[in-house]
């Protein structure tokens, strides 16, 4: 028997969950402009949640429902499963548009929206998102019905290998939903937690600005 | 620079019906003797901005990369990589086998660990979490032996032996030491310095790996994140116990390679063995940490250079002693003085081995290392002799293309208005702004290897197929666009199929050889299909085949002036449609490209922080096959060089023998906030009507230009990249 499912069996797992929440804030938002207010607020909210609820002990494979892209999804997985692994390995059909690149909040390739805010799916436990609204790249648009930002990424060639692209789209989409006329500076900040090894940044900025300007007029 | 003869055209006499009277007229038609790219101005898709055909699936998360393959019953595998650089390991295989969810455990039976990160075992389990449990259950006990993880350790007296060939490898020597000595003594200005570059990681966002779809039986499919679709099945045959022909390799999408993804690799071999044992599909993609430790790198270097310059700016002497840091591999370093002409040269080059992962090819192997040393030394010589940095470069570059390109980047970056052209600025200025230059070269030629099939159906659908892979360079797009242009269609008129070893052969994508090998074969297939098409239809239309043209979605008979929609014309094809196979045509490919880059930086002398304000690149490459994806390639090279200049460095801890930064938290890559204005200019003065690969050349000089710009701004000469603030301050004598 291995000792490694300790995460799930630890009676203090709820405090671990709250630490995960803190990390989510650090990874998904700290790099952006919301640094000053956002992080502290999120940590506070997470603490409040974990204090309010009685500790919940979860182990083994558990079944639960998540709301993903506006649809109820039934999942069956271990409580230690991150949202990222849950999307990719436990959804039917698998939602693999959200990429796994660093698995520790350093690259933004796994960016999704949770209740409309960008977040790193590798830093959250799936089970902790019950009752929240998760949106992935698949929920934004599809080939033949791309959303305006996706369309602009395509036309400006803001993707080469394309492995980072869903993450960039999600980060910038979240920014544009808040700030439809975002400036170059705001766009750079919005995707400062994303990395692109192929070096598409100049085209990413052009693509995003084209949409931002479009929204302005 | 040979320019291919003008596109082949010929005149034919035809009879035309004008106002009811037959008149004899002479018209110009494409030569039917073979394909040519045609006149620059005549293109409808080639040499235009064509959004890539797989853009929509990529931006919507629908592109199935190997990481994304999900199969019924598929297991997830994890590899145990050595946590010591040398020694041995003991494993508790039984515990691992008993771990819930673990289906197979593979002991690689490594007797002697020779490098940090060397794979020693692997497990496959029902979920990645359970596979990680399995690895922990192996409870690996490593017994360390003596090791060297830094070149200093490897060269120390009594250092443990890293390879049987010794820690210092075979030395190669070129040139005349005595002549260089004399030339140095006679020089108007001299400089001597040591330049070094750290080991850089490829850091592809998709890690190395494969999904092996094998459940017993005599057929398998391998989904590979690879630069060589045709380099996998062969290697997988033995571990799967199959014939190579029974294995299909699929590489439809892949998340970056940069030179590190050729062949099945140890991770692929492990995946095959696991699948064979489990009789279930296995998904094995390295974790990010394992990718850092065990998936290759660009070798580091340490170069001692001494150069001499005459009063007129001619480079007269160069001595270079080059150490290559390629771990257990050989490392690479291009010949000095790189592309410059220096009268007397003497060089020595040798590898220094350490117990670390072997270097692999990385975008322009050896060139960025050579570029950094020579471009830095040239600026140091200019300052020593009080000469203009740009003029000295122009004077010492034999190929006239460089002078022209350098002038263009100089204008674009604001050189002629810049105050520090012969001496660096001083750090007490209010704003420390500097400019630096660098140049690059690459071959980018191709060869015979690709087999492209163009198929046209009676319903008007056109398919262009070849087994090649698209690394993000836009290969898939030109497999379609060249054919679409040939038939006067839009991009929606042709479907490209790539990424399978069951399709026509294609070469590996390395050394920027893809476009020059493949584009001519696509063109040839398209041309052959067009000839066949015309041959079939001419008699049916009562005209000559030479007079049939395809343009704007129509088939035009130049004799009668009659126009038939393309789909309708296709309906006149025989039942089985039409097929043509194209192979390489030497005339359609070229070789040898040049580029120049300039960087403008702001240095804060109080904090040592460097900000890259602007980078400019002028790059030639013969005929641009797709200007949009070409500009992206240039951006990519410049951004990677910027990242190398400012941030990237593998850091080894010498006493523990560990890599301190095997993750993106501590191994930094440039992000959006580092990116200033990036200007990519396609050098349209290169009029060669030939396809030539461009990727490598674009990464070569950017970091050199940035380092030179930092020194130019305020005299902070940093000779060891990356240009971190501490080094800038040290160079200014502030720490
Ligand atoms: S995979 Fe989540 S941030 Fe990198
Ligand atoms: S497009 Fe390849 S990593 Fe961004």
Image (cartoon, grey):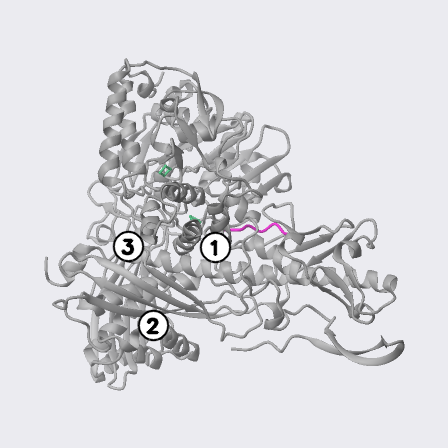
- The answer to whether residue A120 is above or below residue A150 is above
Q: Give neighbour class at mark 2: few <14, some 14-19, many 20+ (Cα, 10 Å).
A: many
Residue B354 point in image, percent of width and height = 29, 49
**Main structural element of the magenta stretch: helix, strand or loop?**
loop
- The answer to whether residue A190 is above or below residue B546 is above
Q: Residue B451 carries which label?
A: none
Among the 4 quarters of the image, the one containing residue B4: bottom right
Q: Mark 3 points at which residue?
A: B198
The reply to whether residue B670 is visible in this rendering is no
The reply to whether residue B573 is visible in this rendering is yes
Q: Mark 2 points at which residue?
A: B337
- The answer to whether residue B286 is above or below residue B437 is above
Question: In 3D space, how far apart are the residues under numbered discs 3 and 2 (Cα atoms)?
Answer: 20 Å
Q: In this view of the protein, which residue sits in the foreground, B570 or A4?
A: B570
Assign the C terminus of chain B to one quadrant of the image.
bottom left
Ligand 2 closer than 8 Å to label 2 CB: no
| Chain ID of residue with mark 2 | B
Among the 4 quarters of the image, the one containing residue B522: bottom right
The residue shown at (32%, 25%) is B139
| Residue B505 shown left or right of residue B659 in the figure | right
Query: As drawn, which residue projects farthest toward the left?
Result: B734
Please report the bounds of the magenta region as a residue range.
Answer: B466-471
Residue B721 point in image, percent of width and height = 25, 58
Question: In 3D space, how far apart are the residues under numbered discs 1 and 3 (Cα atoms)?
Answer: 34 Å
Element type where label 3 sits in the image: loop
**1 and 3 marks in contact (CB < 8 Å):** no
Q: Name the residue under label 1.
A: A156
Q: In this view of the protein, which residue sits in the foreground, A90 or B85?
A: A90
| Chain ID of residue with mark 1 | A
| Residue A139 shown left or right of residue B14 in the figure | left
């Amino acid at each position: 028997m291995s000792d490694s499912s300790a995460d799930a069996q630890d009676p203090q797992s709820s405090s671990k969950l709250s630490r995960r929440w803190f990390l989510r804030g650090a990874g998904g938002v700290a790099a952006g402009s919301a640094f000053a207010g956002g992080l502290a607020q999120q940590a506070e909210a997470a603490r409040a949640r974990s204090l309010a609820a009685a500790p919940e002990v979860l182990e083994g494979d558990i079944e639960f429902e998540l709301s993903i892209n506006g649809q109820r999804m039934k999942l069956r997985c271990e409580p230690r499963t991150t949202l990222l692994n849950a999307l990719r390995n436990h959804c039917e059909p698998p939602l693999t548009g959200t990429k796994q690149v660093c698995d520790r909040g350093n690259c933004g390739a796994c960016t999704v929206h949770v209740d409309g805010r960008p977040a790193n799916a590798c830093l959250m436990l799936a089970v902790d998102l019950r009752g929240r609204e998760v949106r992935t790249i698949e929920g934004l648009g599809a080939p033949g019905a791309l959303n305006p930002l996706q369309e602009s990424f395509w036309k400006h060639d803001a993707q080469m290998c394309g492995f980072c692209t869903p993450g960039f789209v999600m980060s910038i989409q979240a920014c544009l939903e808040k700030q439809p006329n975002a400036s170059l500076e705001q766009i750079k900040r919005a995707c400062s937690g994303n990395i692109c090894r192929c070096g598409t940044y100049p085209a990413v900025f052009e693509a995003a600005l084209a949409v931002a300007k479009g929204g302005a007029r | 620079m040979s320019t291919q003869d003008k596109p082949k055209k010929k005149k034919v006499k035809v009879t035309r019906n004008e106002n009811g009277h037959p008149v004899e007229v002479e018209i110009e038609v494409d030569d039917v003797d073979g394909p040519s790219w045609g006149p620059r101005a005549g293109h409808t898709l080639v040499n235009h901005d064509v959004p890539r055909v797989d853009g929509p699936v990529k931006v919507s998360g629908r592109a199935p990369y190997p990481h994304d393959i999900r199969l019924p019953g598929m297991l997830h595998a994890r590899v145990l990589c050595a946590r010591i650089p040398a020694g041995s390991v003991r494993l508790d295989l039984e515990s691992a086998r008993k771990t819930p969810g673990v289906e197979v455990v593979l002991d690689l039976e490594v007797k002697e660990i020779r490098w940090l990160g060397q794979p020693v075992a692997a497990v496959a389990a029902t979920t990645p979490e359970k596979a990680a449990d399995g690895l922990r259950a192996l409870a690996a006990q490593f017994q360390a032996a003596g090791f060297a993880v830094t070149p200093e350790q490897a060269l120390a007296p009594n250092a443990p032996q890293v390879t049987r060939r010794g820690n210092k490898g075979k030395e190669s020597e070129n040139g005349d030491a005595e002549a260089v000595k004399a030339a140095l003594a006679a020089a108007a200005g001299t400089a001597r310095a040591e330049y070094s570059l750290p080991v850089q990681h490829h850091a592809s966002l998709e890690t190395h790996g494969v999904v092996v779809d094998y459940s017993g039986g005599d057929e398998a499919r391998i989904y590979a994140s690879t630069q060589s679709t045709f380099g996998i099945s062969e290697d997988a045959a033995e571990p799967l116990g199959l014939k190579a022909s029974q294995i299909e390799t699929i590489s439809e999408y892949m998340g970056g390679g940069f030179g590190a993804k050729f062949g099945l690799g140890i991770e692929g071999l492990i995946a095959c063995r696991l699948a064979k044992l489990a009789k279930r599909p296995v998904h094995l993609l390295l974790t990010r940490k394992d990718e850092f430790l065990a998936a290759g790198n660009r070798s580091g270097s340490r170069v001692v250079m001494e150069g001499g310059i005459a009063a007129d700016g001619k480079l007269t002497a160069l001595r270079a002693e080059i150490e290559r840091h390629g771990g257990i591999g050989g490392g690479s370093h291009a010949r000095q003085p790189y592309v410059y002409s220096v009268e007397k040269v003497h060089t020595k080059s040798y590898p220094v081995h350490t117990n670390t992962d072997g270097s692999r090819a990385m975008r322009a192997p050896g060139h960025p290392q050579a570029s950094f040393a020579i471009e830095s030394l040239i600026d140091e010589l200019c300052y020593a002799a009080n000469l203009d940095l740009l003029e000295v470069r122009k004077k010492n570059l034999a190929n006239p293309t460089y002078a022209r390109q350098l002038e263009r980047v100089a204008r674009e970056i604001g050189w002629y208005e810049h105050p520090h052209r012969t001496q660096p600025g001083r750090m007490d200025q209010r704003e420390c702004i500097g400019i630096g230059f660098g140049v690059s070269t690459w071959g980018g030629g191709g060869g015979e290897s690709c087999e492209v099939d163009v198929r046209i159906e009676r319903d008007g659908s056109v398919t262009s197929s070849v087994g090649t892979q698209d690394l993000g360079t836009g290969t898939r797009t030109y497999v379609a666009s060249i054919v679409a242009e040939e038939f006067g269609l839009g991009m929606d008129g042709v479907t490209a199929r790539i990424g399978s070893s069951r399709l026509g052969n294609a070469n590996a994508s390395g050394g920027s050889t893809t476009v020059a090998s493949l584009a001519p074969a696509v063109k040839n297939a398209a041309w052959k299909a067009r000839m066949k098409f015309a041959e079939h239809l001419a008699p049916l239309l009562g005209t000559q085949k030479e007079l049939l043209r395809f343009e704007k979605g129509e088939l035009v008979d130049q004799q009668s002036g009659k126009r038939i929609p393309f789909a309708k014309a296709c309906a006149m094809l025989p039942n089985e449609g039409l097929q043509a196979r194209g192979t390489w045509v030497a005339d359609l490919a070229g070789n040898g490209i040049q580029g120049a880059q300039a960087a403008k930086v702001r240095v804060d002398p109080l904090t040592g922080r460097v900000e890259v304000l602007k980078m400019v690149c002028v790059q030639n490459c013969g005929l641009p096959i797709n200007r949009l994806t070409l500009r992206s390639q240039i951006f990519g090279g410049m951004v990677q060089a910027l990242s190398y200049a400012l941030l990237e460095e593998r850091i080894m801890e010498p006493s523990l023998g560990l890599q301190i930064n095997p993750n993106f938290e501590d191994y930094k890559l440039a992000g959006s906030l580092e990116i200033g204005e990036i200007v990519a200019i396609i050098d349209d003065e290169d009029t060669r009507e030939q396809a030539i690969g461009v990727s490598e050349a674009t990464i070569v000089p950017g970091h050199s230009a940035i380092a030179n710009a930092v020194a130019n701004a305020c005299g902070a000469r940093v000779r060891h990249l990356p240009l971190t603030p501490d080094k800038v301050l040290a160079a200014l004598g502030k720490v």
